[in-house]
Amino acid sequence: MARSVFTLDLGAIRHNARALLRALDGAELWAVVKADGYGHGATDVAGAVLEAGAAMLCVATAPEALALRRAFPSAKVLVMGPTRADEVGVAREAALELVAAAGPIPEGVPVHLKLDTGMGRWGLGELPAPGREVVGLMSHFASADADAAFTELQTTRFLEATAPYSHLTRHLANSAGALRFPKARLDAARCGIALYGISPFGTDPAEDGLRPALRWQSELAHVRLLEPGESTGYGRRFVAARPTWIGLVPVGYADGFRRDLTGTEVIVDGERRRVVGAVSMDVFAVELDRELPPGTPITLLGDGILVEEHARVAKTIGYEIVCGLNTRITRAGREVVE
């Protein structure tokens, strides 16, 4: 019996892909499905976004790309991260496309040159004249979610540097760029977080017409009454000031429900309840207003509980929350619905 269950809504993934395509207004949607589809399941997500009209799948590593190639023999797949010399031949045989951000340009395989316009990470300082292997030119935004002025500056730098080569496919925008910066949409946009119905701005995804695609559920495993002065969990971080019912949920930071989520809310029997005490490896506690039976359903994500809410409590971003989820069958069940 699973201690918790993740449910992926493919209908929501397709909805989000189509919303992004509408925003892109003619530019191609390149779906970023690295990190196992941001914890949602790369193969399932890839199938849904391709069906919805995505033109490319984007990943970080060659092994991620090879897994997708086995599932989607004819899909276009771009490896965005650094590729070792011994991986180039494998990429060539698998008909992958690679990114060159430093060093020699791989031969015999389609290449996208990456220009550093302000991210200060992977990227060429200057754009060389593209050779015959080069099919695309790209850069990456540093702060499209928060700094419009710098994003406009990066866009200008990229457009100026690539103007002589506008016959090549140019791609710059991420999810935030696609939704907020029309000049950056160009030929294609590499969208990740918005595909999953998570706001790149940390706000309610519905504001941009997005639907969360992941639901996470568990149940109460045990309920107990704390008398005044009694505590629950490591460090006695919650001490009852009055007689208090608490419910124990068999999920913890080993499952991706982080230790710094104390204080966030989950849904217990249809009502929002606060997480109290220290989140342990395999269990956390919620404060109840009454005694409830073991087996009472708990929603950790879904039914209005947003990734963005948990991220604010943990002082992080939604990306980190979902990428840290442990969906392995030894810890959780997994379902896919249409």
Image (tube, helix red, strand yellow):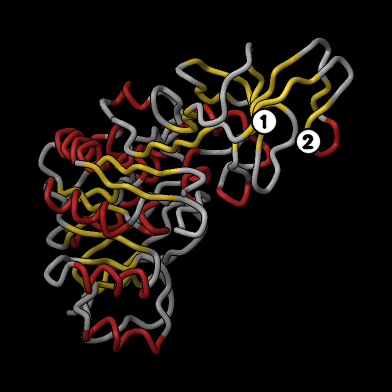
Q: Within 10 Å of the Cα at label 2, are there few (<14), some (14-19), or many (20+) other Cα atoms?
A: some
How far separated are the C-alphas under marks 2 and 1? 8 Å
Question: Three-letter amino acid code at disc 1?
Answer: Ala
Going 35% across and 69% down the picture, which residue do you hit? 64
On screen, residue 116 versus residue 174, left or right, reads right
Q: Within 10 Å of the Cα at label 1, are there few (<14), some (14-19), or many (20+) other Cα atoms?
A: many
Residues marked 2 and 1 touching at CB (< 8 Å): yes
On screen, residue 229 versus residue 253, left or right, reads right
Q: Which secondary structure lies at badge 1? A: strand
Q: Position of residue 39 (x, y in %)?
A: 42, 51
Going 29% across and 34% down the picture, which residue do you hit? 181
- Which residue in the protein does label 2 denote? 233
Nearer to the camera, 217 or 315: 217
Q: Quadrant of residue 279?
A: top right
Residue lying at the far right of the rendered structure: 229
Going 66% across and 26% down the picture, which residue do you hit? 223
- Which residue in the protein does label 1 denote? 285
